Image: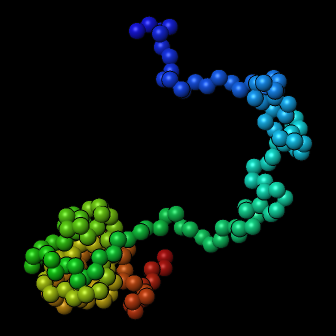
Amino acid sequence: MKLHELHGPAGSRHARKRVGRGISAGQGKTSGRGQKGAGARSGSKIPRGFEGGQMKITQRLPKLRGFVNHWRTEYVTVNVGKLNGFPSGTIVDGAALAARGLVSRPDAPVKLLAAGRVRIPVTVRVHRASVAARAAVEAAGGRIELLEANAAPDAAAGEPREAEPEA
């Protein structure tokens, strides 16, 4: 194959449509612009989003409201009822939860919630746990190890966070 033999696939190259070249050319007289009006004039440009004079959709819709915290940590929730599928005395961490399909990734931050009943003693290593989930696991003979250093029990669950010591 030589350089002069290269060409695009059939139909990929279109000839330029030569408008305004007489009636027999198919695009003569008005050159496909129709009769009169702003679109028929030279230099006519319709602004992007122009809707014929009615209020633009961008002006009819309300502006964005509220606040989105881009640094928020999204926790994957696991209920204590799902822990019954593990053998007694095992260590349930992110890798074990991912192997069972309870979380998508082994390194995902996990929060343990109290829905359901746990009947077996297991050691659970999660990032956070609700007060009721902690009580349920400890009542079954297991224990919870929190992976986050500042993970205090939830204030919404009834137990307030401890105040930091003043310097």
User: For residue 66, which quarter of the picture?
Assistant: bottom right
User: For residue 56, which quarter of the picture?
Assistant: bottom right
* Residue 33 versus residue 47 in the image, above or below: above
* Residue 73 versus residue 164 in the image, above or below: above
Looking at the image, which residue is at 77% across and 30% down? Answer: 27
Q: Position of residue 94 (x, y in %)?
A: 25, 66
110 and 13: which one is in front? 13
Looking at the image, which residue is at 47% across and 67% down? Answer: 72
Asked if one can make out residue 65 in the rendered structure from this viewpoint, the answer is: yes
User: For residue 162, which quarter of the picture?
Assistant: bottom left
How many numbered markers are drawn?
Answer: 0
84 and 167: which one is in front? 84
Looking at the image, which residue is at 85% across and 34% down? Answer: 30
Direction left: furthest residue: 88
Give the colour scheme of this rendering.
rainbow
67 on left or right of 95? right
Looking at the image, which residue is at 40% across and 9% down? Answer: 1
Asked if one can make out residue 148 in the rendered structure from this viewpoint, the answer is: no
* Residue 16 versus residue 109 in the image, above or below: above
Q: Position of residue 105 (x, y in %)?
A: 29, 61
Q: Position of residue 120 (x, y in %)?
A: 13, 84
Q: Position of residue 91 (x, y in %)?
A: 15, 72
